[in-house]
Image (tube, rainbow, N blue to C red):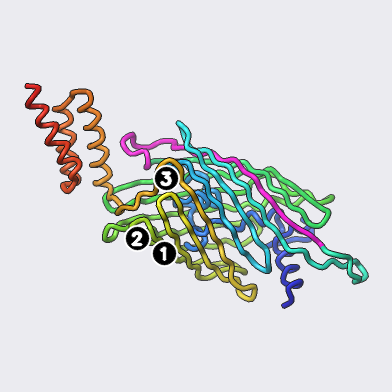
Amino acid sequence: MTRTTGLLLLLFALRPLPAAAASGAGKAGGEFLRILQSPRAVAMGETGAGAYGDLLGALSLNPAALARTPYKEAAFTYNSWLEGIASQQAAYAHPLKYGVAAASLLVLSVPSIDGYNNSGAAAGQVDAGDLAAGLSYAARVTGPWQDARSGLFAGATLKYARERLDGVAAGAALADAGALWIQRNSLGTLALGLSAQSVGGGFKFDTETDPAPSVYRAGASFIFVVAGDPITLTADVKKPEYSASAWGAGAEYQVWRMLSVRAGYLSGQDLGGGFRLGGGVALKLLQFDYSLSSYGKFGPAHRFSLSYKFDKPVAVTQHLSLEQEQARQKTEFARTLMKESRYYEAVLELNGALQLDPGSREALDLLRKARALVGDSR
C-alpha cells in the first residue's frame, strides 16, 4: 500500500459522504470527533463512560465525570495516528463554587496528498484538516452530604466542529451530555454512567448535509484496594450512529499513585479493534500518560498526554479505604469543634474516627489534647 493510497482510504473513512450514497461507516460528518484523545481511556479498551479521574477521558466519553475534578488542571495530548495523520488537544478544567467548568480545543491535521482531475492528470496537492472547540460544565446533582464524592453527577458540553477538504469546508454546532452515579462502600467504589456525544446539526458540504457523528455509551467501573493500591476495572458498550455497536473492557493498577499500568480490549471494530496497552507516571504536579493500539496494516497508533494540576500536588501516598477517609473527615470536624471550645463533642468525634481507623496517629494525638482540655474546662 502506497502512502497516497493509505491516506485516501483513511480520508474516505473520515470524510462525510452524500446522504443518498452513504450507508454504514462514513455516512456521518465530523467522524474525526469519534477518535478518542485520552491515552488512559484508549489503553483501557476505549472505556470510561462509567469512570472518572481523567480530564481528557471525561471530555472524550462522559462530561459528567468533570464534576469529580477537585482542582484546576491543564492537559495536553498528542495522537500520532495513521499514515501521518495526527491530532492535538488542549483542555483546561476549573472548579467553581458549584460544579466544574472546562474548555478544550482539538485540531486534526492530514498531510497533503496528490490530487487528480477527472481525466487522471495531476492537479496539485490537496490539503485537509479538522478542528473542534468546546465548553463544558458538570456538577453533582444529589448525594450524601457527608461524602461529596458520591451521588449523582451530570454534565454537558457545547462544541463547534469544522471540517475542511481542499477548498470545501463545513461546520456544525454539537452537544454532549452525560450522567454518572457513584456509590462508595466498604468493598470499593462502583460507578455507572450514560452519555450521548456529538448530538446536533449536520455538516453541510455544497448542497449535501451529512448528519452528526453521534455516539451513545453506557459504562461501569469498580475500584477496589489490594495491598494498599487501587485497581480499577471498566466496561463500556457504545452505539455509533450508522455503525454497529461495540464493547470494551479494561483495567488499571496504580502503585502508590505514582505508576499506572493499563490494558484493555475493544471489540466490534473493522479498524482498530483488539488489545490495547498503556501506562502513566505521576510526579507530584505532573502526570504523563501513554497508550499503544494497533490498526492492522496501517500500523500502530501512539497517544501521549501531559497534565498539570494547580494548587495542590497529587498525593503520593497509599490509597485510602472508605473507613480511613471517613475517619479523616471526623478528625477534621473534631479540629473545628476544638477551635469553638466544644471539647467534649470533639472527643466523641475522635473516638468515632479511631473506631473506623485504629491506626490514625493524627486522631489519637488530637484525642489526647481534647481530653486534656475537657479536664481543664472542669
Which badge, 2 or 1, comes first in the chain's sequence? 2
Q: Which amino acid, mark 3?
A: Trp
- Secondary structure at badge 1 equals strand
Q: Nearer the viewer, mark 3 or mark 2?
A: 2
What is the quadrant of residue 354 in the picture?
top left
Q: Percent position (x, y) of residue 217?
A: 53, 53
Instruction: Decide: few, some or many residues near mark 1? Use Cα within 10 Å; few <14, some 14-19, many ≥20.
Output: many
Q: CA distance from mark 1 to mark 3?
A: 25 Å
Q: Percent position (x, y) of residue 341?
A: 18, 23
Quarter placement of the C terminus: top left
Q: Tag on residue 261?
A: 1
Find the residue positioned furthest to the top. Answer: 378
Determine whether 284 is above or below 275 in the image: above
User: Which residue is depicted at the point 52% across and 42% down?
Assistant: 93
- Span shown in magenta: 126-150
Q: CA distance from mark 2 to mark 1?
A: 9 Å
Find the residue positioned furthest to the right. Answer: 119
Let me know if residue 359 is in the magenta part. Answer: no
Q: Which residue is mark 2?
A: 255
In this picture, residue 198 sits left or right of residue 71? right
Q: Percent position (x, y) of residue 215?
A: 60, 53
In this picture, residue 375 sits left or right of residue 321? left
Find the residue positioned furthest to the bottom. Answer: 1
Q: Which amino acid, mark 2?
A: Val
Q: Tag on residue 181?
A: 3
In this picture, residue 347 sits left or right of residue 75? left
Which badge, 3 or 2, comes first in the chain's sequence? 3
Q: Percent position (x, y) of residue 142?
A: 41, 36
> Please, what is the dominant secondary structure of the magenta stretch?
strand
